[in-house]
Amino acid sequence: MGWLTAGVEMDMELDPGKEVLVALRRVIRATDLHSRHLARTTGLTAPQMLLLQAIRDSGQVTIGELAREVSLSQATVT
């Protein structure tokens, strides 16, 4: 027997691996929705916002340091 969550029927007896996948999917979906909202309201992508915050917090930094701090590649940062 299943139950309904957010319009999706889910098996109540999910194995731990499936539970993790469902939880990850929810996190990914929430992140995507937040990123879209951020882009609409600020005109910036989430990585751009992270970079600006890191620059504000760190001051003068190299591209490599900045990339490491926000877990982006140097190519993405430049």
Image: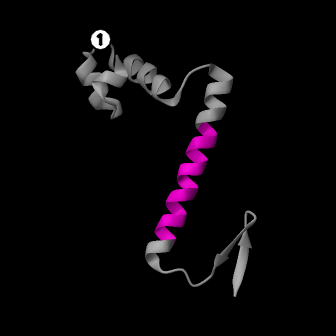
Q: Could you tell me which quadrant the C terminus lies in?
A: top left
Q: What residue type is labelled 1?
A: Gln
Q: In which quarter of the image is residue 11?
A: bottom right
Q: In this view, does 7 lie above or below 55?
A: below
Magenta span: chief secondary structure: helix
Residue drawn at 38 percent across, 17 percent down: 55
Q: How is the image coloured?
A: one colour
Residue drawn at 54 percent across, 80 percent down: 14
Q: Position of residue 64 (x, y in %)?
A: 23, 22
Q: In this view, does 72 lie above or below 52?
A: below
Magenta residues (range)? 19-34
Q: Where is residue 36 in the image (x, y as percent from the top left)?
A: 63, 34
Q: Mark 1 points at which residue?
A: 60
Q: Classify residue 53 as left or right of residue 22.
A: left
Residue 22 part of the magenta-drawn span: yes
Q: Seen from this angle, which residue lies furthest top?
A: 60
Q: Classify residue 12 as left or right of residue 54.
A: right
Give whichever of 46, 69 is nearer the camera.
46
Residue 29 part of the magenta-drawn span: yes
Q: In which quarter of the image is residue 69?
A: top left
Q: Where is residue 68 in the image (x, y as percent from the top left)?
A: 27, 30
Q: Position of residue 56 (x, y in %)?
A: 41, 17
